């Protein structure tokens, strides 16, 4: 299993009239967590794109337990529970407030896609090599 954490402060423009993080922004927090988790491995989305690999989202599920509030510092924990085999990769996200309370969970499924061939592909070997030690 691989996991990484990043922190995001809830900005005023991301909140609704109640001062709660608007539900649609949770997907952006998941994305920030995914990008930073990959970056912590020494790899980036930009590198994958330069290699001709895109990663579109094909499924997103979210559960809301309590609100994130304006100015809260939210910890986004991003977890890979299994090493991907084939074109799909599932990122599990958990969001916590500063008191350590679970606010939200989500699962985002992406596919590795080769736009030149207009076809699904597999994870780049370089990224796979960086992840393998966490799953042995």
Image: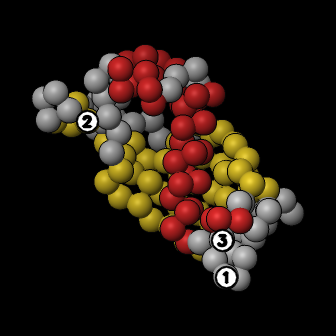
Instruction: Give SS at disc 1.
Output: loop
SS of the residue under disc 3: loop
Residue holding disc 2:
113
3 and 1 marks in contact (CB < 8 Å) = no
Residue at 71% over, 65% down: 12
Residue 91's spot in the image, x, y percent?
Answer: 49, 48
Residue depth check, mark 1 versus mark 2: number of the one nearer the observer: 1
**Quadrant assignment, res 122:** top left
- What residue is rendered at 59% in x and 54% in y? 29
Residue 14 seen by the camera = yes
The quadrant holding residue 55 is top left
Q: In terms of secondary structure, where does tag 2 sit?
A: strand
Residue topped by disc 1: 17
Q: Earlier in the sequence, mark 3 or mark 2?
A: 3
- Screen quadrant of the N terminus: top right
Give the residue displayed 13% in from the left and 29% down from the top: 117
Q: Of all residues shown, which one is farthest toward the left? A: 117
Q: From the viewer's side, name the closer residue of 61 and 12.
A: 12
Percent position (x, y) of residue 25?
A: 55, 63
Q: In the image, is residue 131 above or below residue 35?
A: above
Crowd rating for badge 2 (residues with CA inside 10 Å; few <14, some 14–19, many 20+): many
Instruction: Compare residues 48 and 15 and report the one nearer the observer.
Output: 15
Given this view, does label 3 or label 2 mark the residue nearer the observer?
A: 3
Mark 3 and mark 2: Cα distance apart in space: 33 Å
Query: Which residue matches tag 3?
Result: 15
Q: N-terminal of the two: label 1 or label 2?
A: 1
Q: Is residue 86 left or right of residue 11?
A: left
Q: Is residue 24 above or below residue 91?
A: below
């Amino acid at each position: 299993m691989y996991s990484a954490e990043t922190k995001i402060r809830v900005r005023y423009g991301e909140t609704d009239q109640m001062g709660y993080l608007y539900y649609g922004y949770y997907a952006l927090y998941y994305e920030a967590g995914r990008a930073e988790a990959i970056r912590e491995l020494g790899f980036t989305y930009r590198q994958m794109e330069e290699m001709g690999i895109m990663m579109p989202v094909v499924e997103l599920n979210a559960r809301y337990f309590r609100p994130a509030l304006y100015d809260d510092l939210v910890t986004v924990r991003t977890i890979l529970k299994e090493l991907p085999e084939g074109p799909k990769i599932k990122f599990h996200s958990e969001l916590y407030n500063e008191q350590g309370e679970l606010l939200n969970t989500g699962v985002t499924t992406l596919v590795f896609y080769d736009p030149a061939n207009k076809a699904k592909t597999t994870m780049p070997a370089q990224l796979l090599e960086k992840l393998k030690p966490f799953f042995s």
